[in-house]
């Protein structure tokens, strides 16, 4: 997050764990956007969540949520928050409905077999590993053919959370937007939004994003150590993805 205005009430510092799922919620449930401008609603239907809506989430909507969650948990003003605590709050407040939750996955972000599960959930809007009451795998094709869905994910990686949005185009194709609320010099101190126009380019973008976050020491660790599920909490490659669909 960033402090765009002088008033501290708009401070969303260390607020990525709130900003990211709020972006996803507004993407899949645009009625949760505080603004009711008809032009924005139309633009949202065509292009996904607008940049204006993202800015409002960072600067106006997330700060009161951050204060409420930190107060509830007894944390200080700029403390980091665990994503699961944020999701529980957003569900309780009916901002991110529980019935919209698709699933969670994780593992080694550099392993295509691990990231494939996340990307498949984004593409299909269903958890392919979920089981129904009879123990059989869910019929993902039936869910996928039901309608073209907007899907979003909060990706937790390297103590930071970003948003990944699938924007369906209505012809079987889709865009993937990666939205990072962390300001950098390259973006002029602003959040950034990167659009990939197919799955292949998104997979490449995700790999580049991951590698850009590793320090030289972490790269040395990765080169010297194979992935071990039992040691994942200490491995810089570990990620978690939480997915929701409209």
Image (cartoon, grey):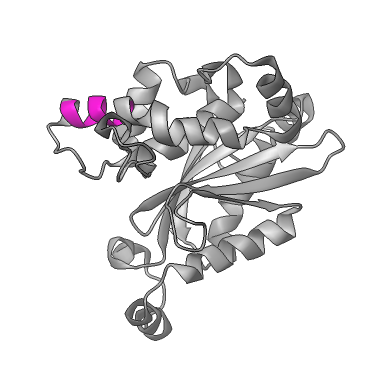
Q: Quadrant of the N terminus?
A: top left
Q: Which of the 4 quarters of the picture holds residue 112?
A: bottom right
Left or right: 112 as drawn, with respect to 95? right
Asked if residue 83 is among those painted magenta in the image, a careful observer would answer no
Observer-nearest residue: 18 or 170?
Answer: 18
Quarter of the C terminus within the rendering: top right
> Which quadrant of the structure image shows residue 128?
top right
Residue found at x 37% / y 52%: 160
Q: Where is residue 10 in the image (x, y as percent from the top left)?
A: 33, 32
Tell me if residue 102 can be seen. no
Residue with the most extreme front position: 6
Classified by dominant secondary structure, the portion drawn in magenta counts as helix
Examine the rendered structure and indicate whether residue 180 appears above or below residue 139: below
- Above or below: residue 154 compared with residue 74: below
- Could you say where residue 137 lies in the image, as x and y percent from the top left? 61, 36
Which stretch appears magenta? 65-71
Q: Which residue is drawn at 61% across and 55% down?
A: 116
Find residue 27 and report its horizontal and vertical position in percent. Answer: 59, 30
Residue at image coords 57%, 66% = 207
In the image, is 126 to the left or to the right of 222?
A: right
Q: Is residue 173 left or right of residue 134?
A: right
Query: Is residue 28 placed above or below 107 in the rendered structure?
Result: above
Q: Residue at x 39, y 40 (%)?
A: 4
Residue 66 lies within the magenta run: yes
On the question of residue 32 being in view, the answer is yes
Q: Nearer the viewer, residue 173 or 31?
A: 31
């Amino acid at each position: 997050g960033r402090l765009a205005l002088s008033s501290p009430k708009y401070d969303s510092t260390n607020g990525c764990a709130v900003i990211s799922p709020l972006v996803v919620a507004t993407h899949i449930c645009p009625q949760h956007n505080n603004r009711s401008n008809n032009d924005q609603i139309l633009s949202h239907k065509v292009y996904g969540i607008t940049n204006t809506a993202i800015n409002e989430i960072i600067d106006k909507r997330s700060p009161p949520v951050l204060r409420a969650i930190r107060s509830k948990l007894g944390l200080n003003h700029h403390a980091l928050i665990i994503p699961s605590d944020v999701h529980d709050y957003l569900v309780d407040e009916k901002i991110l409905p529980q019935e919209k939750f698709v699933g969670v996955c994780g593992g080694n972000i550099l392993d295509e077999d691990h990231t494939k599960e996340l990307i498949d959930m984004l593409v299909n809007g269903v958890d392919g590993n979920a089981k129904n009451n009879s123990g059989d795998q869910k019929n993902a094709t039936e869910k996928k053919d039901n309608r073209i869905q907007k899907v979003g994910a909060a990706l937790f990686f390297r103590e930071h959370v970003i948003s990944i949005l699938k924007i369906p185009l209505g012809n079987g194709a889709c865009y993937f937007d990666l939205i990072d609320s962390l300001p950098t010099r390259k973006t002029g101190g602003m959040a950034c939004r990167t659009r990939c126009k197919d799955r292949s380019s998104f997979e490449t973008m995700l790999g580049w994003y991951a590698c850009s976050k590793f320090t030289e020491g972490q790269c040395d660790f990765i080169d010297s150590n194979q992935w071990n599920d039992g040691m994942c909490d200490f491995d810089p490659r570990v990620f978690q993805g939480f997915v929701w669909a409209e």
